């Protein structure tokens, strides 16, 4: 489903020098895979995830998503491809403080072509499926961290993406809460969702099917 | 409490964010500076107290033709009334004085050529009644204030310095006035030109027994009320006095009551609604500026909330942090005030130069007293205090409060919390709404006023102004003692003017074509009862030789020109008013009351209407009545001493020198003054209205800019605070357009609320102004539409910049973990 070939990402250091965050990355991820990216801090894990998630456009190399050569796409086309195929989970949850759980879940749908009734149905499904119906009118700060991340995952998959990207989804959680999220990921994966997660913990990585180790921008 | 260290820190913080500091300082400078400048001008021209010792007990004297002495039916004093009130009013007035305006020709003084000079004839007691003695020399004595009395003159300080080089031995020297040598006996104090912007004062010297002494109301009267008498009591006493007079000397021309406003007030009465407009506009701008400053300070404190909590966590005391913030506000306020002061001292003279008095066309008698321009320090203090109090009070304190509550939260979620605390946001929002509302009201009001003034200024004159020149000449009674001499003088001048190459036609008129309201005539049409209670209609009187209408291009609609006596030509409006639906030719008009001694005139022609804006005190003016010059000279020669000559030219080749030469050939004692093309005179007219129009428009624009800056500031802050939110939304699929929409929607809802509140505000302001100024038109839809468009444009720009910034938030950066 995903094929990266010779992907490189660098930032200018000044005086014409470049600082390479990712070097010569070749990576294949097939449909239904569950990949855990591991490595020390500053290795380029988040950078890799942002490239996969098509938030970052400043890289070189080739990135095929289902046969689509995304490196030839314009930023706008990439954005619409992302909207259609990819969901995101963040370490800091990144829920919007001023919106209720229900409204937070509705955001991704509001940026895609769904009718009003479809949106209501999808948000209702998600609330039901993640068993947070009772919390739908609460604001994020009224929820525990685990519950917030639950909403974060629900929001990531509500628009039915094929690929779920998660950058240290359990980094801010107690281990028991983290375990719950990991079980949820495994269940989603069993239902057919392709998942790429960044994690520091061997235990979490064991929920995945394989591990990719990054060190100083190289896959090892 | 505030320390040097805090000051240095504050200065460093402000330098570190130059954009914020600049906007705050500019806001303050505009708010304080523009207001101070404009009020300095208003104060200098309209509000300054009179420089008279008796100022508080001086009243302007009008005689009323009805019994209740209301304003609508009042006249200046006649000679007879003046004498009677002096004689009988001893228990009401300490003194009654009067004056008449005139222009005299002053003979050549060393290198200064002969020139026409504004002068006032005053009763001998005039200066003692008002309580302002000459600075040098003495006032007139009663012995000098008689017909044929000694030739003495008092001069103004300006005249002394400019014409006589301020020579120290000026008293006792002589100057030639209308061909006679007059001895200078006094010099008035600096900056005093009252009344009639006089440079010379001559004795009034009323004729002992003039035939028009009871009917000719031309005297400006001033009374000095006795101690302990209120104006109402005095009014009652005058009414009783008038009854007594009428019993002693029955005469239909006797006054029946007096209308006596305080003297100062009588000068500013008609300007008051216009001042009100300016004052409201200025207050609006001050309010907008204050709200802006408050918003900026609030924004500032919120932006530094993270730093606040960090410093507290590091052990800084609460009080110290507050002190630092307060210091920043104070440093800004001081800089802003300084810039405001600088701005004010820079704009004030410019505004004065633009003001009607600066252009030397009298808009306000107040400019005759103390016309030095100076900064209005009390107002400067007031504006500064408002900015300080509102800015620090509404902006700074709530911000401190809000950030105090927020401390916990601010540390928790890194240093950035996603959005503003709700109550803070509401407070900031309400500042912006107030600003937008006031700006909206201000804009609507200034557009309405602009419309009104534009109409006044652009109204057609009713005659041609192109290829026409005019100038004034005074035919004083001293130079032309009888009617024949005066008539021959005018004929000679016209003949010489017609012989100038390039002159197609020449004619004369009294008053000048553009100042119809100066001469009012009382009249009654044949076959209708006189209007009650006044007993006559008022019309503009124009005294002209035959051929006038043709020369100035004023269309004759019906009938013919006149040459013979007992005829008149009336304007269309007058004819329609007097004889609706009838043929006015051949109808008759009586001059004065129906039972009075004045003659009847037969209407021989109808001309088009012309522009003339009546003094509201005159009540309704029906139109214009033109009378032949020869006959008016015969029956009321004292009404015709200043003539306006009008030349129709084929191009602009006729020079001033040619005109002066022609005049000298006709009579070497005559001086031409204010030679001007009718086009130019037209452009110079209505200077007061133009001036107010400029001021009000400036205020409107200023308010708009300040409100836009306020909106911009708020949205920018919000965007900065919500960077993470925009990053999240962008990561979740929002396009740039959708993010722009998000910010714009917020701007739009603020704007909408502002509009709503502003609509009510406008309605209120217009009602308030209308209660003082009945002439103000209703704002038409076009004004509202343009006001809305202007405000939307300004708001649009204010939204666009932050919205674009929001749309460019990079999620990779905004969402980075650390
Ligand atoms: N916008 C940027 N500019 C410069 N350097 C960056 C930028 N973003 C990331 N980096 C650098 O790239 C490296 C990898 O970052 P990141 O992918 O976040 O690492 P990880 O997630 O593995 O801890 C770090 O050294 C970081 O400092
Ligand atoms: Mg990372």
Image (cartoon, rainbow, N blue to C red):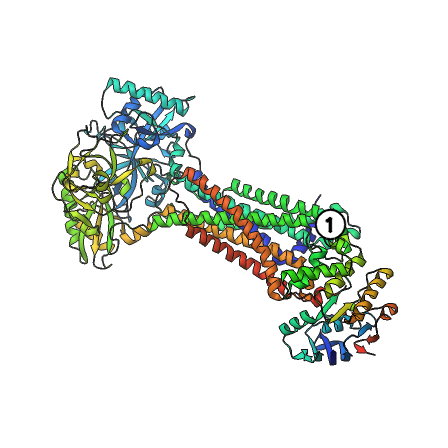
Q: The residue marked by circle 1 belongs to what chain?
A: B
What residue is drawn where x is 54% and y is 51%?
Answer: B752
What residue is drawn where x is 73% and y is 47%?
Answer: B404
Q: Is residue A76 left or right of residue B571?
A: right
Q: Using the image as rendered, state which of residue B52 and residue B392 is in the foreground.
A: B392
Query: In the rendered image, which quarter contains the N terminus of chain A?
Result: bottom right
Disc 1 crowd rating (10 Å Cα; few below 14, some 14-19, many 20+) is: some
Q: Is residue B331 visible?
A: no
Q: Using the image as rendered, state which of residue B465 and residue B131 is in the foreground.
A: B465
Q: Where does residue B322 sit, x and y in percent of width and height? A: 71, 47
Q: Quadrant of ligand 1?
A: bottom right
Q: Where does residue B503 sit, x and y in percent of width and height? A: 19, 56
In the image, residue B243 sits, relative to residue B53, either above or below, namely: above
Outermost residue toward the right in this view: A203
Q: Is residue B446 visible?
A: yes
SS class, disc 1: helix
Q: Where does residue A134 sit, x and y in percent of width and height? A: 76, 53
The image quarter containing residue B93 is top left
The image quarter containing residue B818 is bottom right
Q: Using the image as rendered, state which of residue B243 and residue B578 is in the foreground.
A: B578
Q: Is residue B38 left or right of residue B651?
A: right
In the image, residue A70 sits, relative to residue B293, either above or below, namely: below
Q: Using the image as rendered, state which of residue B751 and residue B242 is in the foreground.
A: B751
């Amino acid at each position: 489903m995903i094929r990266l070939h010779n992907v490189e990402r660098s930032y200018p250091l000044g005086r014409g020098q470049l600082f390479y965050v990712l070097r010569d990355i070749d990576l294949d991820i097939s449909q239904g895979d569950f990949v855990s990216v591991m490595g020390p801090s500053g290795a380029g894990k988040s950078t890799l995830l942002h490239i996969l998630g098509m938030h970052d456009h400043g890289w070189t190399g080739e990135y095929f998503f289902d046969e689509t050569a995304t490196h030839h796409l314009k930023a706008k086309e990439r954005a619409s491809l992302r909207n259609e195929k990819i969901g995101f989970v963040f370490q800091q949850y990144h829920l919007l403080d001023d919106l209720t759980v229900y409204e937070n879940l509705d955001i991704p749908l509001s940026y895609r072509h769904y009718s009003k009734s479809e949106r209501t149905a999808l948000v209702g499904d998600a609330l039901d499926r993640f068993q947070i119906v009772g919390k739908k009118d609460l604001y994020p700060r009224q929820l525990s961290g685990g519950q917030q991340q639950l909403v974060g995952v629900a929001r990531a998959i509500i628009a039915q993406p094929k690929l779920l990207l998660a950058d240290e989804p359990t980094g801010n959680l107690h281990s028991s809460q983290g375990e719950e999220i990991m079980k949820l990921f495994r269940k989603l994966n069993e239902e057919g969702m392709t998942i790429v997660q960044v994690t520091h913990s061997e235990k979490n990585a064991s929920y995945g099917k394989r591990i990719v180790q990054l060190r100083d921008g190289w896959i090892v | 409490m505030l320390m040097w260290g805090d000051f240095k820190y504050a200065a460093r913080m402000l330098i570190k964010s130059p954009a914020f500091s600049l906007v705050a300082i500019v806001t303050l400078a505009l708010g304080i500076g523009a207001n101070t400048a404009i009020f300095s001008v208003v104060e200098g021209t309209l509000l300054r107290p009179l420089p008279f010792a008796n100022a508080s007990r001086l009243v302007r004297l009008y005689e009323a033709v009805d019994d209740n002495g209301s304003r609508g039916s009042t006249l200046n004093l006649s000679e007879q009334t003046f004498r009677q009130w002096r004689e009988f009013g001893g228990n009401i007035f300490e003194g009654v004085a009067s004056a008449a305006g005139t222009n005299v020709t002053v003979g050549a003084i060393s290198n200064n050529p002969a020139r026409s000079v504004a002068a006032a004839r005053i009763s001998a007691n005039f200066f003692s009644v008002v309580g302002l003695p000459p600075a040098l020399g003495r006032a007139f004595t009663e012995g000098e204030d008689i017909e044929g009395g000694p030739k003495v003159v008092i001069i103004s300080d300006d005249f002394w310095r400019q014409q006589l080089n301020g020579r120290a031995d000026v008293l006792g020297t002589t100057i030639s006035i209308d061909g006679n040598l007059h001895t200078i006996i006094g010099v008035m104090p600096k900056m005093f030109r009252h009344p009639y912007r006089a440079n010379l004062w001559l004795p009034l010297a009323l004729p002992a027994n003039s035939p028009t002494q009871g009917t000719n109301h031309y005297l400006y009267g001033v009374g000095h009320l006795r101690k302990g008498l209120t104006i109402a009591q005095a009014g009652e006493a005058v009414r009783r006095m008038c009854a007594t007079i009428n019993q002693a000397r029955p005469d239909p021309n006797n006054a029946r009551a007096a209308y006596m406003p305080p003297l100062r007030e009588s000068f500013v009465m008609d300007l008051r609604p216009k001042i009100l407009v300016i004052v409201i506009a200025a207050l609006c701008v001050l309010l907008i500026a204050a709200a802006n400053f408050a918003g900026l300070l609030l924004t500032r404190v919120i932006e530094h909330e993270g730093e606040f909590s960090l410093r507290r966590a590091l052990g800084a005391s609460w009080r110290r942090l507050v002190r630092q913030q307060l210091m920043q506000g104070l440093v800004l306020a001081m800089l802003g005030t300084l810039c405001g002061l600088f701005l004010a001292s820079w704009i004030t003279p410019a505004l004065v130069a633009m003001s009607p008095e600066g252009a030397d066309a009298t808009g306000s008698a107040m400019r005759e007293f103390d016309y030095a321009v100076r900064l209005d320090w009390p107002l400067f203090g007031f504006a500064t205090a408002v900015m300080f109090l509102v800015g620090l009070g509404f902006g700074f304190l709530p911000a401190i409060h809000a950030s105090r509550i927020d401390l916990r939260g601010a540390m928790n979620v890194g240093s950035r919390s996603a959005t503003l605390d709700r109550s803070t946001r509401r407070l900031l929002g309400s500042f912006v709404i107030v600003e937008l509302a006031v700006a909206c009201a201000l804009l609507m009001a200034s557009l309405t006023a602009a419309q009104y003034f534009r109409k006044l200024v652009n109204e057609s004159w009713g005659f041609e102004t192109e290829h026409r020149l005019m100038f004034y000449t005074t035919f004083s009674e001293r130079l032309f003692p009888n009617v024949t001499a005066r008539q021959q003088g005018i004929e000679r001048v016209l003949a010489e003017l017609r012989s100038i190459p390039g002159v197609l036609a020449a004619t004369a008129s009294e008053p000048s074509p553009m100042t119809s309201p100066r001469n009012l005539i009382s009249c009654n049409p044949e076959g209708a009862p006189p209007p009650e209670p006044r007993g006559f209609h008022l019309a503009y009187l124009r005294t002209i030789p035959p051929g006038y209408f043709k020369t100035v291009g004023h269309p004759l609609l019906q009938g013919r020109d006149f040459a013979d006596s007992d005829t008149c030509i009336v304007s269309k409006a007058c004819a329609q008013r007097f004889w609706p639906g009838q043929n006015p030719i051949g109808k008759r008009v009586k001059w004065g009351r129906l039972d009075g001694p004045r003659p009847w005139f037969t209407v021989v022609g109808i001309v088009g209407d012309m522009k003339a804006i009546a003094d509201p005190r005159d009540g309704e003016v029906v139109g214009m009545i033109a009378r032949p010059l020869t006959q008016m000279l015969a029956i009321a020669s004292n009404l015709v001493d200043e003539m306006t000559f009008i030349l129709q030219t084929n191009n602009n080749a006729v020079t001033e020198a040619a005109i002066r030469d022609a005049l000298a050939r006709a009579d070497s004692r005559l001086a031409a003054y204010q030679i001007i093309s009718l086009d130019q005179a037209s452009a110079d007219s209505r200077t007061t209205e133009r001036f107010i129009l400029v001021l009000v428009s400036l205020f409107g624009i200023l308010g708009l800019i300040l409100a836009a800056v306020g909106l911009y500031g708020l949205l920018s802050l919000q965007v900065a605070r919500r960077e993470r939110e925009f990053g999240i939304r962008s990561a979740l699929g929002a396009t740039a357009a959708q993010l722009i929409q998000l910010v714009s929607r917020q701007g739009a809802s603020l704007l909408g609320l502002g509009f709503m509140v502003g609509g009510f505000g406008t309605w209120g302001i217009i009602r308030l102004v209308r209660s003082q100024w009945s002439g103000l038109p209703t704002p038409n839809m076009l004004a509202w539409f343009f006001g809305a468009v202007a405000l939307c444009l300004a708001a649009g720009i204010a939204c666009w910049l932050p919205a674009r910034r929001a749309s460019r938030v990079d999620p990779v950066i905004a969402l980075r973990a650390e």
